[in-house]
Image (spheres, coloured by chain):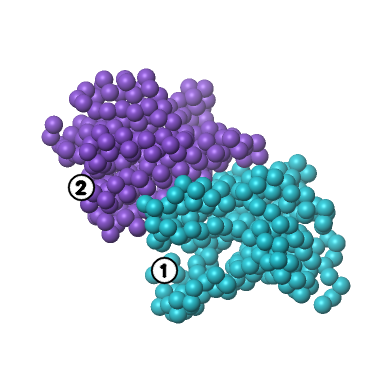
């Protein structure tokens, strides 16, 4: 297959749905070889059949450190030690008011949204440096790191951390030709907010009223930013957090 | 020294108060009439901080505790209430930074830094804020972040991540606790002169910092004091960068 990612090996986490799934389609459509990672085994099987080609999938619970290690080791074995691209799209959002926030919910959110991207990026960077591969990593942050939403404390903390994970990892890896960037989406229609859109459409509309474009993003509109960031088109872009929010943070 | 603080003087908890910036904050707050609960993991360091608090004309209670222990938030709150009968301010200053290249940082370092610099802060905020809300009281919280919540330095990815998270969680705390009359802000210091500061920082400071020198711990203390005070009554969810202009270069 030809395309701007032709011959590139890419890991995409959270690939079974939402932004991760759209990113998998976008990268595969431009020629990348994928290792699709998610905890949703059926969702991964469905993704692989919709992608066609010879992509790989791995069912993994990224809240576990060992699972992160397994993802990178599997990719290195599968691709003869060459990983070119990592997209950290897996994330969870559990709504809980601050005064009632449980430790369990906090830890699970931090483990999946922050520690997993850290661990995966760390191990992928190590392999890139070892192999002299000038690769690219994209993280998914959130505009909520800057404009928080009540009830999203752990998610907000994790996404603020992802912003600085992106910037500080970019700083350290730049001398090796490795780029690390992030996209900060606004309201995007994914499984993360499917319940809200279904059960409380007024609340969702109220959120969108704060978006100058007056609509939510489709996952594909975030995936296209990620695809740009991990492509050679963005060869001088590193440590950037690209806002894709329909104008939410303008006011 | 006078007769010490009055029994209705305000009370603040300062974590990481055994030295450096935390001790500077404690002394500054003592000078401005706060009674203090000072905490860290090392008893001898805290005793020295308490002496300095008393020399500043106030009184202090020492609590030796590890912020990674889930029982610490309630222990600190109880100490404030048992010792002084009230709590008005919380200053989350304790932090851990372990310098290792990104690709060599072991999980243990990541876990320790996220726990100390982010998770423990959140749950101490929750403990104190819950007390205020339950009793229809108000108060103010200041989290000590870092210029590294915005700019990158080498070998500190977990630390920078924790501080980026801390800056964001400060905002969501401010958002959710605002309706209860609780303000939450941050101070983000640049390079501050403490017992841990390498000499090279002092030598290089004139080149790297527009003000031409490192900060003094009590120059962080004055920012904290402002944010805790009613002078900052309309200030919430933000951070003061106290860095001598470092981020301008």
Chain B rendered in what hue?
cyan
| B150, A201: nearer the viewer | B150
Q: Is residue B57 visible?
A: yes
B63 and B54: which is toward the camera = B63
Q: Is residue B231 left or right of residue A37?
A: right
User: Which residue is disc 1 drawn over?
Assistant: B248
As drawn, which residue projects farthest toward the left? Answer: A2
Residue B235, quarter of the rendered image: bottom right
Query: Residue A226: where, in percent of width, then height?
Result: 30, 41
Q: Residue at 82% x, 67% y: name it.
A: B5
Same chain shared by disc 1 and disc 2 = no
Measured from the top left, where is residue B86 in percent x and y? 80, 54
Residue A231 image point, x, y percent: 23, 44
Residue under the point 38% across and 32% down = A14
Relative height, residue B62 to residue A122 (above, below): below
Mark 2 lies on residue: A232
Q: Colour of chain A?
A: purple
């Amino acid at each position: 297959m030809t395309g701007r990612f032709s011959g590139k090996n890419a890991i995409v986490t959270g690939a079974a749905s939402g932004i991760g799934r759209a990113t998998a389609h976008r990268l595969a459509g431009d020629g990348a070889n994928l290792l699709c990672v998610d905890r949703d085994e059926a969702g991964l099987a469905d993704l692989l059949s919709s992608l066609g080609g010879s992509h790989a999938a791995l069912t993994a619970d990224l809240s576990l450190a060992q699972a992160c290690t397994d993802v990178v080791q599997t990719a290195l074995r599968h691709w003869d030690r060459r990983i070119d691209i990592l997209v950290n799209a897996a994330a969870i959002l559990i709504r809980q008011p601050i005064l009632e926030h449980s430790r369990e919910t906090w830890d699970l959110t931090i483990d999946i949204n922050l520690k997993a991207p850290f661990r995966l990026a760390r191990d992928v960077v190590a392999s890139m440096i070892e192999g002299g591969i000038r690769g690219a990593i994209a993280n998914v942050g959130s505009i909520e790191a800057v404009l928080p939403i009540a009830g999203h404390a752990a998610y907000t903390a994790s996404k603020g951390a992802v912003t600085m994970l992106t910037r500080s990892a970019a700083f350290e890896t730049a001398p090796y030709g490795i780029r690390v960037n992030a996209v900060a989406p606004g309201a995007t229609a994914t499984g993360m907010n499917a319940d809200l859109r279904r059960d409380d459409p007024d609340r969702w509309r109220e959120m969108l009223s704060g978006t100058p474009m007056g609509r939510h993003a489709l996952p594909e509109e975030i995936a296209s930013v990620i695809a740009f960031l991990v492509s050679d088109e963005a060869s001088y872009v590193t440590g950037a957090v690209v806002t894709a929010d329909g104008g939410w943070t303008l006011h | 020294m006078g007769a010490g603080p009055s029994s209705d003087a305000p009370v603040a908890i300062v974590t990481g108060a055994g030295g450096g910036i935390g001790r500077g904050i404690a002394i500054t707050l003592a000078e401005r009439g706060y009674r203090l609960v000072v905490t860290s993991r090392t008893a001898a360091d805290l005793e020295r901080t308490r002496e300095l608090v008393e020399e500043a004309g106030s009184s202090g209670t020492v609590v030796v505790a590890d912020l990674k222990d889930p029982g610490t938030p309630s222990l600190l709150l109880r100490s404030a209430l048992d010792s002084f009968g009230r709590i008005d301010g919380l200053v989350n200053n304790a932090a851990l930074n372990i310098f290792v290249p990104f690709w060599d940082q072991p999980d243990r370092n990541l876990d320790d830094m996220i726990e100390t610099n982010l998770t423990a802060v959140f749950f101490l905020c929750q403990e104190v804020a819950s007390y205020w809300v339950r009793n229809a009281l108000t108060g103010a919280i200041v989290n000590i972040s870092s210029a590294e919540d915005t700019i990158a330095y080498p070998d500190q990815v977990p630390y920078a991540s924790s501080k980026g998270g801390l800056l964001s969680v400060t905002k969501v705390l401010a958002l959710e606790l605002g309706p209860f009359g609780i303000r939450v802000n941050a101070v983000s210091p640049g390079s501050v002169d403490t017992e841990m500061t390498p000499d090279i920082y002092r030598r290089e400071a004139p080149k790297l910092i527009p003000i031409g020198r490192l900060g003094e711990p009590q120059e962080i203390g004055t920012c904290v004091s402002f944010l805790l005070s009613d002078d900052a009554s309309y200030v919430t969810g933000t951070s003061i960068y106290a860095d001598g202009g470092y981020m301008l270069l």
